């Protein structure tokens, strides 16, 4: 009986669903284009369906000659980060000598990293990739499985009770002798006692399982809650509240904490807010509200076209755990106010009326943004999305500039509202978390280091520079490593900067 319960319990546990990344909405897979020492890698990590569970890893070296790739998951912080287990060696694909695949166990929810080391003709290279890990929901047991287990369980209960009865009724009689009234009475008593014992075991099993279920329920990811409000002057206020998730309990060790006031800046801002007008996705704003108190952000909205906007706010916690908070706000006709700072906007025709194969987007100042798009777009396929900017007379702009330290920013949005991903030339990882992961020595103060290390390390990374003084000619092209999570219609908002102008190109995609 206990074995039956254990098996049933394990099956339910395995059916508990999870998603890996909260950095985006509905887009758990991690895509990264970066350098491990001298080797340029395109890394895809598909976090597990369950926690604990197995993450799938796919690494393509764009630098030839790589002989061995090893990988190991470790927590971003805490003792686990210092005592990393022995890394696994990835398998070489039989079709492609520069494609390496493998799988890694992710043992607990929280802020993790996968450390990758690469061997080749130019020595060894390292890169660490942040992997947020969290259970998302508990899936109910399948009806057919539950029915089968219930029938088997009933059979076992009936069997035990019947055996106890038979033991008292007939086991002690000689062969051929019929049981009398005394035996029947003893048998009924034995069956009642056996039933009570079995029922007690079932009750204990159920209590044990309920406590397992409750403790798993504790692990299920609950995003920080964001409440948006707008006053008559156009002041947007965002209130962040923590619904409680993986809160450390007395007697339990927890290396993962999260709160509304442990945020670290990601490319200069504590919050990156995309406001996208519903349901046409025809107007987009990339804004940066300022923190006014713990868990409170404010922004004077620019004069936006009226309508209902969905808000996607990207934040990063001190331990490198990123989250995208979602809310909505109705924007009425507001007093005129210009865009300020790093804020930028763009608009296009409604996605329903747009050509899903469009490659050229005409910008308001006569410039053009061009998507060097592949022939077909498939879900889950790691792809480099490449965009180029052109002057009105078809030339490469000579004054390309970094927009918040990067060659470009892109938002991939599914038109049904189920997917939102804010992507950079490095990929889908949070830049702040990526920088944290590159630093060895976990005893540091994460938040303090991230703030100061940010400027220094960002310059060293691909497609990023913070020293605006040394303006060597920047490329007129930007690329984003990403893969659509599911088939369907998507809209892409791509931002590049030349001079003091941030251009927002809008493209559509039908993904198969
Ligand atoms: Cu960005």
Image (spheres, grey):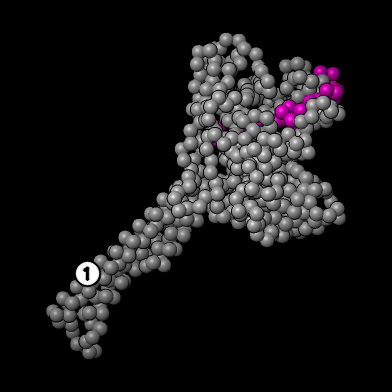
Residue 305: image x %, image y %? 59, 15
Q: Quadrant of the N terminus?
A: bottom left
Spot occupied by residue 53 in the image (x, y as percentages of width and height):
57, 55
Report helix, strand or loop for mark 1. helix
Q: Residue furthest left?
A: 181
> Where is residue 503 shown, x and y percent of the image?
73, 22
Left/right placement of residue 177 relative to residue 68 reads left
Between residue 122 and residue 346, name the one nearer to us. 122
In the rendered image of this protein, does residue 148 appear above or below residue 302? below
Residue at image x 59%, y 35%?
A: 263
In the image, residue 306 above or below residue 433: above
Residue at position x 77%, y 58% from top?
A: 68
The answer to whether residue 485 of the structure is visible from this angle is no
Q: Residue furthest top?
A: 335
Query: Who's the residue at 22% across and 87% down the image?
Result: 173
Q: Position of residue 160 (x, y in %)?
A: 31, 72
Between 94 and 323, the residue placed more toward the observer is 323
Q: Main secondary structure of the magenta part?
A: loop
In the image, 305: left or right of 90?
left
Residue 187 appears in view: yes
Whether residue 414 is in magenta: the answer is: yes
Kindly identify which residue carries mark 1.
192
Q: In terms of image quadrants, where is residue 100?
A: bottom right
Would you say 293 lies left or right of 148 here? right
Q: Is residue 443 above or below residue 178?
A: above
Picture quarter containing residue 88? Answer: bottom right
* Identity of the residue drawn at 78% across and 45% down: 35
Q: Which region shows up in magenta? A: 392-419
The reply to whether the magenta stretch includes residue 410 is: yes
Find residue 155 and report its image quarter: bottom left
């Amino acid at each position: 009986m206990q074995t039956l319960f254990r098996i049933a319990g394990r099956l339910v546990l395995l059916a508990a669903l999870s998603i890996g990344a909260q950095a985006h909405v509905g887009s758990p897979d991690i895509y990264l284009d970066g350098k491990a020492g001298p080797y340029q890698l395109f890394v895809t990590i598909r976090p597990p369906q369950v926690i604990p569970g197995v993450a799938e890893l796919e690494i393509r070296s764009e630098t030839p000659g790589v002989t061995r790739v090893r990988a190991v998951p470790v927590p971003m912080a805490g003792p686990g980060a210092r005592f990393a287990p022995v890394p696994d060696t990835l398998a070489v694909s039989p079709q492609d000598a520069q494609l390496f695949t493998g799988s890694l166990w992710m043992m607990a929810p929280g802020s993790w990293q996968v450390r990758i080391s690469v061997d080749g003709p130019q020595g060894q290279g390292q890169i660490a990739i942040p992997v947020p890990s969290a259970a998302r929901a508990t899936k109910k047991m399948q009806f057919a499985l539950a029915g089968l287990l219930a029938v088997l369980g009933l059979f076992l209960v009936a069997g035990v009770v019947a055996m106890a009865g038979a033991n008292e009724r007939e086991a002690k009689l000689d062969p051929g002798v019929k049981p009398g009234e005394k035996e029947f009475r003893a048998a009924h008593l034995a069956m009642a006692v056996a039933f009570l014992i079995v029922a007690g075991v079932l009750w204990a099993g159920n209590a044990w399982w309920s406590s397992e279920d409750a403790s798993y329920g504790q692990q299920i990811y609950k995003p920080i809650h964001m409440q948006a409000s707008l006053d008559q002057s156009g002041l947007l206020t965002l209130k962040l509240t923590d619904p409680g998730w993986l809160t450390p309990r007395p007697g339990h060790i927890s290396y993962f904490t999260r709160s509304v006031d442990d945020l670290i800046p990601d490319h200069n801002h504590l919050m990156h807010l995309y406001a996208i007008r519903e349901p046409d996705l025809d107007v987009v704003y990339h804004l940066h509200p300022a923190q006014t108190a713990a868990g409170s952000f404010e922004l004077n909205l620019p004069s936006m076209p009226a309508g209902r906007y969905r808000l996607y706010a990207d934040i990063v916690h001190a331990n490198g755990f990123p989250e995208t908070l979602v809310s909505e706000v109705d924007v009425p006709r507001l007093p005129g106010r210009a865009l300020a700072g790093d804020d930028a906007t763009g608009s296009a025709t409604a996605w329903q009326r747009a050509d899903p194969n469009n490659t050229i987007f005409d910008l308001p100042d006569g410039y053009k943004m061009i998507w060097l798009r592949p022939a077909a777009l498939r879900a889950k396929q790691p792809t480099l999305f490449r965009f180029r900017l052109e002057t009105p007379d078809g030339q490469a702009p000579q004054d390309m500039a970094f927009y918040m330290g990067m060659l470009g920013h892109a938002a991939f949005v599914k038109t049904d509202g189920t997917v939102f991903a804010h992507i950079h030339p490095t990929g889908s990882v949070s830049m702040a978390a990526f920088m944290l992961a590159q630093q060895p020595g976990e005893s540091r103060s994460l938040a303090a280091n991230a703030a100061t290390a940010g400027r220094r390390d960002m310059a060293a990374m691909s497609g990023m520079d913070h020293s605006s003084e040394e303006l060597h000619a920047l490329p007129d092209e930007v690329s984003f490593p990403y893969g659509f999570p599911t088939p369907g219609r998507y809209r892409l908002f791509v931002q590049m900067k030349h001079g003091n102008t941030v251009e927002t190109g809008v493209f559509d995609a039908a993904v198969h």
